[in-house]
């Protein structure tokens, strides 16, 4: 008698193929709704902005170190790669990075914003915003 109950219970336990497919479809629909709100281009641009501000900070530190060792700033960013200057190397990778949009960073010495030092900046080709070392985000619109 107990043996028959087990068979009957075992036959009723578990899910049917229709129930499993229905759950998969519902989970897929929920995932599609959740992923629809994520804009990969927005995250890409945010990553580029973080990279630009980090590069500007790194280049600014290298320029300050150069100035401390040589009593003046280099005339161009390539001056950071000059191994004849005191304090070499100023950049660990020995490369002047391009901004995340593929352009050269703009460097002027003396700067128009930092009149006793230098200005370094880049502009987003997507948004037109300028990122710089003088602390004010600017829009070129």
Image: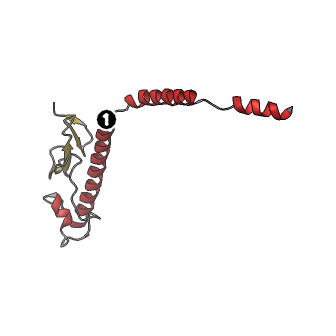
Q: Residue 87 sits in which quadrant?
A: bottom left
Q: Position of residue 7 (x, y in %)?
A: 76, 33
Apparent side of residue 136 relative to residue 28 in the rendered image (left or right): left
Q: Residue furthest right?
A: 1
Which residue is located at x 20 percent, y 45 percent?
A: 122
**As displayed, is residue 106 above or below residue 22?**
below
**As displayed, is residue 83 above or below residue 58?**
below
- The reply to whether residue 71 is visible in this rendering is no
Question: What colour scheme does the image use?
Answer: secondary structure
- Residue identifier under label 1: 42
Q: Secondary structure at mark 1?
A: helix
**As displayed, is residue 130 above or below residue 24?**
below
Label 1 Cα neighbours within 10 Å, binned few <14 / some 14-19 / many ≥20? few
Q: Residue furthest bottom?
A: 84
Q: How many marks?
A: 1
Which residue is located at x 14 percent, y 51 percent?
A: 110
| Quadrant in which the C terminus appears | top left
Task: In this rendered view, identify the residue nearer to me: 21 or 5.
Answer: 5
Task: In this rendered view, identify the residue nearer to me: 133 or 3.
Answer: 3
| Quadrant in which the N terminus appears | top right
- The reply to whether residue 54 is visible in this rendering is yes
Q: Position of residue 14 (x, y in %)?
A: 66, 32
Apparent side of residue 84 relative to residue 64 in the rendered image (left or right): left
Which residue is located at x 14 percent, y 58 percent?
A: 76
Q: Residue 80 sits in which quadrant?
A: bottom left
Q: Position of residue 39 (x, y in %)?
A: 33, 33
Task: In this rendered view, identify the residue nearer to me: 41 or 72.
Answer: 41
């Amino acid at each position: 008698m107990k043996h028959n109950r087990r068979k009957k219970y075992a036959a009723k336990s578990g899910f049917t193929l229709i129930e499993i497919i229905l759950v998969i479809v519902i989970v897929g629909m929920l995932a599609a709704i959740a992923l629809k709100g994520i804009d990969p281009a927005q995250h890409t641009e945010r990553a580029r902005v973080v990279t630009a501000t980090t590069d500007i900070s790194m280049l600014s530190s290298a320029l300050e170190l150069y100035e401390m060792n040589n009593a003046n700033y280099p005339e161009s960013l390539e001056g950071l790669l000059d191994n004849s200057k005191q304090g070499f190397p100023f950049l660990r990778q020995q490369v002047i990075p391009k901004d995340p949009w593929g352009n050269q960073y703009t460097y002027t010495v003396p700067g128009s914003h930092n009149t006793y030092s230098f200005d370094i900046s880049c502009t987003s080709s997507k948004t037109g915003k300028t990122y710089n070392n003088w602390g004010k985000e600017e829009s070129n619109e």
